[in-house]
Amino acid sequence: MTQPVSEPAAYLDHAATTPIYPEVVEAMTAQFGRLGNASSLHGSGRAARRVVEESRETVAAVLGARPSEVVFTSGGTEADNLAVKGLFWARHKADPRRRRVLASAVEHHAVLDPLHWLAAEAGAEVELLPVDGDGVLDVPALQHSVDRDPDSVALISVMWANNEVGAVQPIDRVVEVAAAHHIPVHSDAVQAVGQVPLDFARSGVDAMTVTGHKIGGPFGVGALLLRREADVVALLHGGGQERDVRSGTIDAPAIVGFALAAQLAVKCQPERAPHLAGLRDRLVREILEAVPDAVVNGPGASGRLPGNAHLSFPGCEGDSLLMLLDAQGVECSTGSACSAGVPQASHVLLAMGRDEALARASLRFSLGHTSTASDIDRVVAAIGPAVERARAAGVGGRPEGATRVRS
Amino acid sequence: MKVVAAMSGGVDSAVAAARAVDAGHDVTGVHLALSRNPSSYRTGARGCCTLEDARDARRAADVIGIPFYVWDLAERFHADVVEDFVSEYADGRTPNPCLRCNERIKFAAVLDRAIGLGFDAVATGHYARLRRGPDGEVELHRAVDSAKDQSYVLGVLTQGQLRGAMFPLGDSTKPEVRAEAHRRGLLVADKPDSHDICFVPDGDTAGWLGQRLGAAPGPIVDADGTELGRHAGTFGFTIGQRRGLRLDRPAADGRPRYVLSIEPTTSTITVGSREDLVVESLTGTAARWRGAVPDSSLSCRVQIRAHGEEYAAVVHPTAEAVEVDLLEPATGVAPGQAVVMYDGTRVLGSATIASTGRRTT
């Protein structure tokens, strides 16, 4: 099952990580060669601090925030943890009645798991709000939940766009519901930057998570955009380098790379989005021609990320398909959380009302800035035979799956 | 051939995968996730289903240079192996979960899936040999390394399963395999062998069973029914067990006592002397023969527990069962274990021990 060496893989997993821009590598390489801790007071320190602050201004400018609202972190997971735990702790401390945390049922694990931790360890009451069959938040359910006892809500967390099925969430309506009671809103926008237009200040959210490696920047860096008046308790204590809510030596090369990537991603977004949507629409159409009983998950084109396609292939195990496509040099994802590489049925698809078998029969194809028409051709050529094979292999491993006794 | 190498994260399966590559096969490494709640680390020589083992398997595949995937078989493993193990103990038998795993997981669920995905065989690190017999049938033979031989836990496999199996280590000894792992730069070369039952995390099988089956206290009696002590549940015992009886009263003759029988319905454990343990015959059910069912009695050698010795025997086959007369006295024969029949190194067939016949003198 070794892949052909002649051709590089058709990479359709940009939602996992997207190739770093060559300009970013160049800028980071230059910065790696420069001396200085951005917190030092001498000339070398000031030089490092200067590029960090310029980067902060760049990130702020392209995402619609003020520089002082950019808190650099080690990436999306840390930013989500800081937002969810930090806001809960601060709000709960200010008023112990605020125990409830409301979030959509389709949040990323970097939000869900801190919420479960808060419930287990910090007395939080977590309410996961339903989504519709396309994975879009049920706003009336949110409204109802808030109205039941607005004073007890510590925060609301709803992602900007879902990482699995690409559903763009009605953030403006979430903010509307929350604003009536001055409840802070956090939104994980990791998948949205560079894919859809996005403006922190105009959105009205209080905290927003962004990360580098999903937008053509490096791994290990991201930011929480945090309104100046939002009060959060720190996760990492130490030097207090980032607005006193995030400690750790400032990683100037990573921040330079992140800022440049954010700039490029946002600048290119208006022309890239229709290009990706066009490729994506052809991909979905031609997959459905090859596999007529495949099921498209998530909203129609206007309501989803332009680079996201998500389909279920009844009768297949998603990881069988992934392996067969991988062997053909087509790289995609089952779009679900992994522990030791073990795929679990996606909580997102289950929340959308899919049954477990269909949830496990799913693949996510995600496109990005290096995607080409030939990538799509490769998928379309490989998918039919792969589905046929995967169906023959069946759902072995499931107790309900028929196992032939070989004799 | 296109081969799935089942890689546990141990040294044997890693070398087996590497040898399959050397033999010219197109090999894909697959780690079987069997635990529903994998713990992070191995403790000592126990288990094979931790995240650390998955990582070790992945790194071995990297070194060998083959693609690597994890297949989630936790639900199947739980239903077919773990629950079977618990219910067998509940019924007073002593199951062999490794045998069950080979029969129902590695050479059933995994092999079926592999064949469906376009592979031809599943290679494992078992110590056993496969040979093509004169009539074209695949024969299963003992490994060269008798200390590591695992033909006993593979004896249950059908001809169809053996046709899809590959055991690259059967001609080697364990020290040779470890040395080869070193030569190949496999980081698992010195990893301890796994022992015990992989899904019982701390090796306390009786305690683990007790959590699942609940306490069912009862008497420990001698042959004439005199109560010698109490126990918390019959699942804590196996035929021939001597340790852990904790009898209140020593035997009159002062000699050690052994478990002779387990009666889960009355929760009674009967103990007796070593002589009382000697078995002269046994019956087996669910018999599987490598070739056709023999039409007459045959003299052969039998193995009646894992890592146990062979006994000379005469086997009387019927359609789906066997009656076995042991020509040499055997002890510690437990229903639920397999009786595997050999002609020299060749496995003739296998059955599950259902009952035993004691010496009547």
Image: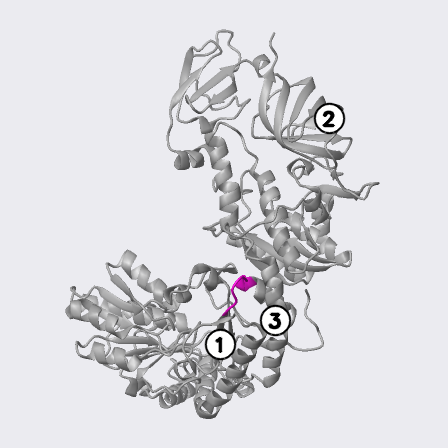
* Protein image colouring: one colour
CA gap, disc 3 to disc 2?
52 Å
| Pointer 1 residue | A309
Q: Which residues are magenta?
A: A312-319
Q: Is residue A61 magenta?
A: no
| Pointer 2 residue | B301
At 47% from the left and 9% from the top, the residue drawn is B224
Residue A296 is left or right of residue A106, and the answer is right
The quadrant holding residue A210 is bottom left
**Label disc, if present, on residue B133 of the rendered structure:** none
Residue type of the residue flagged with mark 3: Gly
Q: Quadrant of the C terminus of chain A?
A: top right
The residue nearer to you, when weighing A132 against A339, is A132
**Label disc, if present, on residue A384 of the rendered structure:** 3
Q: Position of residue B236 (x, y in %)?
A: 46, 28
CA gap, disc 1 to disc 3?
17 Å
A256 relative to B153, above or below = below
Residue type of the residue flagged with mark 2: Arg
Residue A64 is left or right of residue B39, and the answer is left
